[in-house]
Image (cartoon, helix red, strand yellow):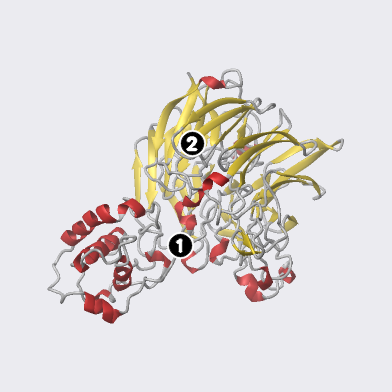
Amino acid sequence: MKQIWTISMKHTLLPMFLLALALPIATAAAEQPEAQIKRGETLYAASCAACHGADLKGKSALDLAGSGVISRWPGWTAADLFSRVRTMPYGAPGSLTPQQYLDLTAFILDKNGIPLTGDLPAEPAVLARIPAQPERGARRDETLLTKRDITAEIGGGPTQAELDVAGGKTTDWLFSTHDYGGQRFVDISQINKGNVASLRPVCVYQLGDTNPFPANPIVYKGAMFITGRNSVVSIDAATCRLNWRYDRTQRVAQGFALKLNRGVAIKEGKLVFGTADGYLIALDAGTGKKLWQREVTDPANNGGGFQSVPMIYDDLVVIGPGAGEQGVKGWVGAFRLATGEPVWKFNLVPDDGEPGAETWPSTESRRHGGGAPWGTMSLDAKAGLVYVPAGNPTPDFDGDKRPGANLYTCSVVVLDVRTGKLVWYHQVTPHDIHDYDLTQAAPQFSATVAGKLRNLVVAAGKEGVVHVLDRDSHEQLYELPVTTRQNNDKVWIQPDVTADNSTVCPGLIGGIEWSGPAFNPATKMLYAASVDWCRIARDPGDMSRGYLTAIDATTGKMAWRYNSQRPMVAAVTTTPDLVFTGELTGDLLAFDAKTGKELFRFNLGAPISGGAVPYAVAGKEYVAVASGAVAAYWQVAPGASTITVFALR
């Protein structure tokens, strides 16, 4: 999900002459600023941490380090930051002394990596010469802790052959969605509907942050690989013992994207992931050592950051930047697995002269047209086709500024994985005016529909409808709403509010979010989690709810439905007779895959918005689940980013 920022600048910058009048005459600056920074740290803990977080990474208010307030306005100086700090604490601006505000400013600058040669002086002209941001191109701090080298166990895998058969019987979980087709189906049965009630936690690993945690871990040969906002971690998948941990500091960037990472891809001993500040990075899966890094986009200049999980096929890494609302012109591209070198790029909002450009009114409207992908891709490995879900057009709600269908936004875009050439597309929502991103181009599966065995793919997103398309004929065979839908033809004058005050459903964060449906070949059913929330601008959290809907994949009819008291955004996973998912209430759930009967419930104490991953190590089956924080607009108490591993007692 993408953050919608509303930031008041009413009290941000005080005139310099008022600033000068407010401060006493400066004394000579000390040679070292440590004492001032320490005083600021103490003040911050007492006056600021409750809202902005003990580590400045945000809580109920914006983060103040990395992606926080400073980075949103390039060119800020210490004077600008000082003026902003003086508007705090919330509800009591100016309640501290001028010296205390200077101390806080020094502490915040220090936490953002700004070197200070002495105490900050109370002189506006001097403060204005001190930058509040690191210089572009400055070294990015990185740390690597290796407790156990697992290179021997990894053995340079998985190979392409192992990835190709991941959709079959395997005890590993090799993709964020399990396999190229994104079925999220695991053919293991040691844990089954007869004994699932006996699952108990066997180990826990905490990443050490409270950022949103929608990640899906992957598992290969007994090693689990997890991503946090600024980290990649490998643990033993049976004991949670740390193998290694890689941490990095993000550069200045902007937007909600910086608060999360949805996962890594693995092949031939390499882990590849995109970062929200625009880098593509490869690590050694055995040691965590960085193999290469490539700067692909610049989020500070409307380049977007990476939100989706890469797809690796052959020697190609396929990924595209998200954050369309930040003025990004969406695209997806391929990069060499060995080096990160660019290979091809396809514009999801066309350039001049490209097919689809005629569906936009002008070159300018396309320059920042959105369409940025942040959901789940899938791959038809036999055909060599990658299926990409394109996001919404921008501006989100003002369709008058971009008349036309606005290709290829809100579409499944099918490309030749080796060349990036367009093969076909299906636009789910032409000329979208409700921020109805397409978030899913998965799962791919085969089923008999109308008496014919067909190769199929699901297209779904925030409009709240599961569309099933024939991958060969490209026709839509059926669709089924999985949340409340009403007044979708009406125009919002602001998010969730129409001119006649009618209710539009789904609302701004309704429908199907970042976790897509699962397909069970044993039951021939699709399972989709969804959000039912019409107007978040007016409705409190207790007005929202969620569903887990089982769909007969041969008919498109609903088979059963589970009603949740809160939106359902966690991933759905299925085994031959079970369905696993989680709730924002913190409950891990297991259902009978055929009937929907609830068989297991365990509360983890924090929202579940990531994956539940079944796998086996040394013949013993486990289920790992990611729990932690979600964005504040979901209106649930946050928790620490945690992996909990379950097994039969």
Circle 1 sits on which residue? 254
Residue 368 position by quadrant: bottom right
- At 67% from the left edge and 37% from the top edge, which residue is drawn? 549
Q: Left of 296 or right of it: where is 458?
A: right
Q: Secondary structure at mark 2?
A: loop
Residue sitting nearer the eye, 276 or 618: 276
Disc marking residue 379: none
User: Label 2 neighbourhood size at 10 Å, few (<14), some (14-19), many (20+)?
Assistant: many
* Numbered disc 1: secondary structure: loop
User: Can you identify the residue that label 2 sits on?
Assistant: 586
In this rendering, position of residue 200 left or right of residue 441:
left
Residue type of the residue flagged with mark 1: Gln
In space, the residues marked 1 and 2 are separated at their CA atoms by 29 Å
Percent x, y for residue 183? Answer: 65, 38
Give residue 237's position: percent from left, percent from top.
46, 31
Disc 1 + disc 2, Cβ < 8 Å: no
At x 64%, y 60%, the residue is 392
As drawn, 415 above or below 208: below
Q: Residue at x 52, y 59 (%)?
A: 4
Residue that protrudes farthest toward the bottom in the picture: 17
